[in-house]
Structure formats: C-alpha cells, structure tokens
Image: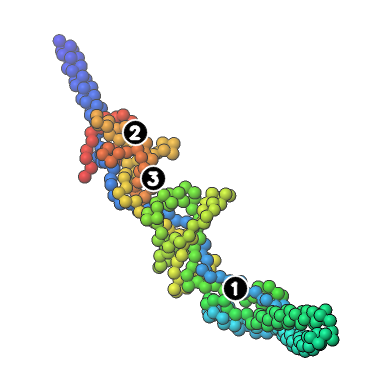
Amino acid sequence: MLVGGLWLASSLAGCARAETQAQVVEAPQSFPVSAPMRQDARYERAYVGQVRAHRYAELRSRLRGVIEAVEVDEGQAVKHDQVLFSVSAREAQQELLKARAATKAAEAELQLAQIELDNTRMLAEKKVVSRAELALAESKVELLKAQIEQAKASEGQASINVTYAKLRAPFDGAVNRIPLKTGSLVGENELLTTLADTSEVLVYFRVSEREYFEYAAGGAEGRPREVTLELADGSRYAHAGVVDAVESELDQATGNLAFRARFPNPDGVLKHGSSGKVIVATALPDALVVPQKSTFEVQGRLFVYAVDGESKARAREIVPKVRLEDSFVIASGLQPEERFVLEGVQKIKDGVQIEAVPSS
C-alpha cells in the first residue's frame, strides 16, 4: 500500500507540473502595440556640389606683343574698366597711321574728281564733250566715295586694335593667377589671367532621375527651393541658397540631371572651383510614421508585425517612402487605424498569439 500510494502521489504531482508548464507555454506574451503616427516630417538629402563664380572670364591678349606693364597683383580686387595689363601696340599704332593717311588720300582724290566732274558737266551742257564722258566722271566720283568709306572702316578697325593694348576688367571681381609678367612676349589670344566675381556663387549639383521626378511632383508650391551648403570642413555655410535652375537634358551616361543653386557670398568665403554638399530639405506634412525599432528586414524588404482582430501578430510588408533618423515614413502597407507591435519584434514569430498592451 505504501508503494502504491507513493506512485499515485508522484503521478499526480507530475500531472500537476505538466499542466502548469502547459499553462505557462500557452500564456501569450505581452507586447506594446501602437497605430502609425501622424506627424509633420522633414528629411534632408545631400548632394556633392561644385562652386562657380556667377561671373567668370578668361582675359586674353588681343594683340601679339610684349607686356609693358602689369597693373594689378594676383588676388587683387578690381573695378569694372580698370586697366589690368598694357601690351606693346607699336604695330597697331603704325597701322592706324597708315589707315588715316589712306583716308586723307582718298578724300583728296575725291575733291579732285569732284572738280573734274563739275568741269565735265559744264562742257557737256555746251555739247563740247559727250554724255559718256560725263557718266565716266560721275562714276569716278562714286567710286572714290566708296573708297573713302572703306578707308574710314580700316581706320576705325586700326583704332580699335590700338585700344586692345590696354586690357581692362569687364566687371568688378578678383584677379587670379598671372602666369606672364612684364617683358613677356605674348601671342594673340594668349591667356593672361582670369577674373572672378564671387559676390554671388552658383553651386551645381546632380540628382538622380527618380529624385528629379519626386521634386517635379511637388508642384511649384511644394518643391524645396531653399537649400543649405555644407563646407569641406563639415560646417554649414551661414547663408541659405535658392534652387533657381534645372538643366533641360538628362545625362545619358549617368542618368542624372544638373540643378543650380544660387548663394549670396558677401564675405567672399566661397571661392570659384571649391566644392561642398548641397543639403536639400523636404517637408512631409501629415506623414504616416513608424519607428525603426518596430521593423525588421527579410531579403531587403521591410516588415512590421500587424496585430489582427484575434490579437495575433502577422508579418506585414510596408513600403517606406523615406528613412528618417529613427523612423520610417511609409508609403503603403499600413492604414492609420491599424495596430502593430511597437517593441520586441525579434521575439515574435508570424501568427503567434500576443497580449496587446497599448503603448504609453
């Protein structure tokens, strides 16, 4: 009897432990759940940009000759029409003298021809000479008039060539490197220096075709026009810029499209040829947002555990529109009223029963 009683007690205790373990296994775990949040979101995209002066010119010699004077120094700020270089113009001056002499000679010949025409006209009226001789005298006067016009044009061109001896600034700006100094022989069209006006700068950056269509879909009012610039040292430039132009043709090799942003540069911090990152911020009003901690990836696709009416967690694919610092703005996959597991998704399997606890 003692042995039988012990066996019965042991059996009952074992059944009780098994029943207790079954209850523990079957008891659903508690997880905080939430619906997607509605909030105004903002995200930034960075693009490599190239800085260009809004006015930039290559200054080249218009004459062949010797540099007689360099009137400025490298890096110097200059004003519009200020003389920068003086180039020897002796040949041009001689051409101008020849052109002036040719004009005077043609004018003298015209005076003589005019006198001859007057005499011929008088003799023709008295029928001393024929009408043919009169016509010949008239045509000679017209020919000399044409020659005077040609001589004056040559004189004017020679006068312009003389002015090329003084190379002047086409606008206010800063002089860059001057490779040739006083006494150097220069050829026609040889580069003497460049001039940059960086009171404003243009920053060119390229965006993908997909991003361009996102930009265009915003409409005139919704497109982000104001941008900022991140400098090479990681700091933000003090002045905001504005996107004011978009290239009209897509680069077939890269699939990118060039944008242009204009920035004020009152302190001259930005230099022609430098680089930076253009930061384009886009506002997403009333966006549907889920935290990153509530998501998991499977083969590059993004999922959450949506909670159905039976409190079961079901894996649901969501399509993110953009990734923020600690959350996703979703384009599709969840409705605003639906609930999903907020935390602990790594502890859940698809279809498991959970105890849904509203998030605080």
Question: Is residue 44 in view?
Answer: no
Q: Position of residue 51 (x, y in %)?
A: 51, 65
Labelled pair 3, 1 in contact (Cβ < 8 Å) = no
| Earlier-in-chain disc, 3 versus 1 | 1
Q: Which label is found at residue 321?
A: 3
Left or right: 330, with 276 as reference point = left
Report the quarter where the C terminus lies: top left
Measuring 68% from the left and 73% from the top, which residue is drawn there? Answer: 189
Labelled pair 1, 2 in contact (Cβ < 8 Å) = no
Three-letter code, disc 1 = Thr
Foreground mark, 2 or 3? Answer: 3
Question: How many neighbours does mark 1 have within 10 angstroms: few (below 14), some (14-19), or many (20 or more)?
Answer: some
Please tell me in which quadrant of the rendered image residue 73 appears: bottom right
- Position of residue 71 relative to residue 274, above or below, is below
Please tell me in which quadrant of the rendered image residue 332 appears: top left
Question: How many neighbours does mark 3 have within 10 angstroms: few (below 14), some (14-19), or many (20 or more)?
Answer: some
Work out how far the residue at label 2 is from the one at label 3, CA to CA, in angstroms.
19 Å
Query: How many labels were placed on the picture?
Result: 3
| Earlier-in-chain disc, 2 versus 3 | 2
Q: Which residue is mark 2?
A: 315
Labelled pair 2, 3 in contact (Cβ < 8 Å) = no
Work out how far the residue at label 3 is from the one at label 1, CA to CA, in angstroms.
46 Å
Q: Secondary structure at mark 2?
A: strand
Left or right: 12, with 101 as reference point = left
Three-letter code, disc 3 = Lys
Foreground mark, 1 or 2? Answer: 1
Three-letter code, disc 2 = Ala
Q: Which residue is mark 1?
A: 194
Report the quarter where the N terminus lies: top left
